[in-house]
Amino acid sequence: MIVGTWRIPSRLRRGGRSLFLLFLACSLSSSCVSSGSSGDGNGDDTVNTEPSGGPSAGGNLTEGDVVAGSTTSSTEIGSEFRIDIHSLNRQNADVVTLDLTISNTSPTESVSIYAPPQQGEEPGDLQSLTLIDGANSKKHLPLLYEDGTCYCEAWHDTSLAPGESVRAWVAFPAPPADVEHMTFLSYATPPILDIPVTDSPGERVEEPAQELSTPQIWDVQSLEEGLEDNSTREETSEEVAISLSSDVLFDTNESSLDESANEVIRQVAREIDDSSARTVSVDGHTDNTGNDSVNIPLSEDRARAVRDALADLVEKEEISYEVAGHGAGQPIANNDSEEGRSKNRRVTITFAK
């Protein structure tokens, strides 16, 4: 199973986490902007269907030529950066192409944009533009040739002058035939939902120039934070991982469950009962305070305490439990701050959906 994860390029990192969480919220509800709709007019993360204007490498935009457009002030690129979606077309049973324009709407300043998708050392090199099949919880990455370059109408300039635009298409693995809409996601713009998938191949797309690499379609991983203080919940299409804050479950340096932990663990037990799980993994983690001789046994003892509580509460028969203590070896936050250390003190319960 491949789980979709992101590494944000350094120049786009400011605000990137909020955009990622915004996408995750959108993938679980219909609360975000759909294609053909407009935002709330507050100037941030606004979707607009008006053509962006300015010259375009693939021809000028015309009325009705844009399915949806998105501006953003959530990254260092600023609010003058814009992406307009023209269409999402099935070329055949295996390929869809996204026709889009990237624009600088500033009258005075140049902006930097990312290069076409490509295979690189970092996962983010290929994920600057992605399509989401919400019906099947899948992330579709751009199609690549065997040399690692994208099957796309590549653009060469990574800086746009004031008012300048570049139009291109990018090929992706096609979703199942019954999927009629997909979500567009980029590093620098809010998600655009419900882009219609049409059966028209369009006129601008070229046949592949060489052999294509194996299509990459990943499971979408959803993340929900703040369930109980620093607790989190992560989901793929196949499993759930719930990380419970040790600060909620235990007193400092203790491995006996606090009375307040009972209801939290009872809720997890109910979800296990409703799942298809036959095996439940319970993993304990600490911050980096102290050393391995203390942290590893403490994390394992805490995991065993949670396992024992779950075993008493889960009504489902034939459940087996796997317990491990990792000490400070698998941090999810920076241990340089108390907030980070608090996030790292956790017990994670993983089971099939």
Image (spheres, rainbow, N blue to C red):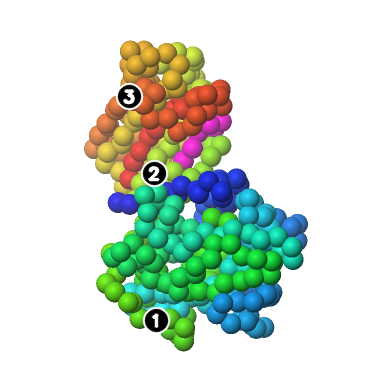
- The amino acid sitting under disc 1 is Glu
- 1 vs 3, front mark: 1
Residue 60 badge: none
Q: Is residue 84 visible?
A: no
Where residue 205 appears, as percent x and y from the top left, is 43, 81
Q: Position of residue 5 (x, y in %)?
A: 42, 49
**Up-down relation of residue 172 to residue 185 (above or below):** below
Q: Residues within 10 Å of mark 1 (few under 14, many from 20)?
A: few
Magenta span: 228-233
Instruction: Give the structural element (helix, strand or loop) at label 1.
Output: loop
Q: Which one is earlier in the sequence, the residue at label 1 or at label 3?
A: 1
Name which residue lies at 56% across and 37% down: 226
Q: Nearer the viewer, residue 324 or 218?
A: 218
| Marks 1,3: beta carbons within 8 A | no
For label 1, the residue is 206
Of circles 1 and 2, the one toward us is 1
Q: What residue does disc 2 label?
A: 240
Q: What is the x, y in percent for residue 114? A: 52, 59
The residue drawn where x is 49% and y is 15% is: 251
Identified by mark 3, the residue type is: Gly
Residue sitting at 38 percent across and 71 percent down? 151
Horizontal side of 69 relative to 209 (left or right) equals right
Asked if residue 243 can be seen in this view, the reply is yes
